[in-house]
Every structure is written in structure tokens, then in C-alpha cells.
Image (cartoon, grey):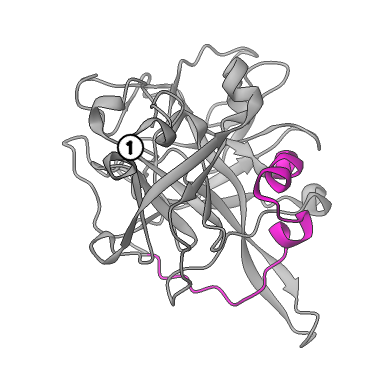
Amino acid sequence: MLGNPHLCGGVIVSFDPPQILTAAHCVIDSPHPSTYTPADTNPYYAGYGHTDRRMQTIDTIADWTIHPNYATANEPQYDLAIVTMKRPMQRSAHVERAIFWPPSRQERQPEQGALIGFGYVEDDGTEPRYLQRLTLEIEQDTTGTTTIHTFAAFDATTRSACHGDSGSPLLAHALFMDPASHIATARPYVLGLLTRIFGVFDPDPTQLTCPVRLDKNAPVVQAFCNVSTVLDWLAQTTHLSIDHLTKPDADHSWLIPERSHQPSLSPFLWRLNPFLWFQGLYPALSSNYPLPGNAAATTAPSFFLCICLPVMMLSFVFF
């Protein structure tokens, strides 16, 4: 979990070196940690280690590296950054490193996933004490696209992402065959990180909590960076092999509240532009439906953490 108040989420890539993957827009407008002298004036920190935010371990953020395609051109499909902590992180009953969806599984991508995070849960500025989960339908263009897109609707029975959920992961389970025991178990894999929400606006730009749907008859679309397509960059930046990044090495413990689980919706596929495919609720939408997008500033789960930056540095409108 990044931020105080909570700003963004992310996933733990490795415990030592202590590295986290989050959304680049969560850090790009803030001075780099190296600019603070002496080092103890560094205001950035992250919390991890528990699904209860009050029980999390807090440590200083020492460094970050932004994907070069986002740093130079703000291309949302590369809205990723690696955050390095000051000290090694520790596994626990609540924490495991993230496993990313392997490229070899692209043709079998799940139709449904779960967004997990500590983002705001009410438009009055309420932050959850416990890690939250939101079920989303998934639609992806052909193999090789750079963004995963999902949707959710704002109404009395469904939920959507809010400010504080940027960088949070979209998870899906897939079978993993343990080479030692030859036993297949369902493991959670990270498909992507939340970067944008389309079809919403902030009623009060000075109080960024949960956005409001622009049109009650139009869908709200949440866009995720597809990590599978940037594994080469992730491996090069973290000095970890793609094999390590995409294969589990220990059992995962998932203690996620069920009360925030959103029921499935039956979507129709529609197209926003020639490159990005979304799922919506209405088949009559035009080919280039003009949905304004808000960037997202986020939260994180069991291999997920909360990244914290001073409030005065939040110059962007991301969720």
C-alpha cells in the first residue's frame, strides 16, 4: 500500500531485493527519493504484510524505476514502475510474492478476474481497514496487445474501483503442476495492474475518493496494463528471470473479505478504438464511444502493498 493517506497499490515482485510493481503515474510526478538529503527526510513509504492495514509493516521507499515508454510518452499501456524498498521484506501467512500470467497461457486467458486493493469504498472519503475484492469480467484483444480491459458498473448492487486502487492487481486462478509433488493446484496469477477508469468523473476534484458514472446507461470501464507483454522489461529491471516471475515457489495464503465480492455481469463486447477492446453492458454503443478516462491511484493484496506519498505531491487525477 503506497501513500498516507493511502495513494496506490502494488504487488511484491521479490522480497530480497525488496521490489514492488505499481503504476507509474503513482510516482512519476514526485521528486525521486535520491533527491532527499539527508536520507532520513525521505517522505515515501509502503505498508505490507497483512490484509488489515493496521497490522501492516511500514518501511521506506528507497528507489523507483519507471517504464521508459511511460516516462517519455505517458503511454498508458506502459503505466508501470518498479519500487525498491530500503530493507528486505519478509514472507508471512498473509504475504507471498506475485506470480505473473505466463505468455504461454495467453491463448487461455480467464474470462473473469478479481481486482484487489485498499482503495476508497465510499464517496465520503472512507478508506477500508481490510483488503477488498471486486470481481470483473475480462476481455482482451488478440494475443500481443498491451492492455487488458475489464468493466464494472456503478449501481446499488455492484462496485467499481476508486481512487487508491491504481497499481492494484487483477488476479485470476490457473492450475500449476508442482514439479516435485506432481500435484496440480489452482494458484493466483497477476494479469495486470489498474491504470485507468473510463466513463466517470470526480464530483469534487479537491476530494478524490470514489468517482461518479458519467451516464447511468453507459458502462464504466477499468483498464489494466497487461504485465505478460512487458515481462522482458520487468526481468531486466529486477534482474529476475521470466521463469522465476511466472512460476510459483510456495503456497499462497489468501485472506480476502468476501463481503465486497461483486456478482458477475453479462457483458457485450464493444470497441473503443482500433487498438483497445473493452466490455460493456450495451451492444448498441458506437465503435468509438467517447469515454473520458481518469487515471487511477491505488492499493495492493497478499503479495500486494500500499505505497505512501505525501498528499502535496498528488498533482494528477488518477485512481
Q: In the figure, residue 36 lies in which quadrant?
A: top left
| Residue 244 visible, this angle | yes
* Residue that mark 1 sits on: 155
Quadrant location, the C terminus: top left
Residue in the picture at 29% in, 42% down:
156
Amino acid tagged 1: Asp
User: Is 153 rendered above or below residue 201?
Assistant: below
Asked whether 238 falls inside the magenta stretch, the response is yes
Asked whether 234 falls inside the magenta stretch, the response is yes
| Residue 221 visible, this angle | no
For numbered disc 1, what is the local secondary structure?
loop
Comparing 93 with 286, the one in front is: 93
Q: Position of residue 192 (x, y in %)?
A: 60, 44
Residue in the picture at 56% in, 30% down:
79
Say left or right for 81 vs 39. Answer: right
State the residue lying farthest toward the front: 38
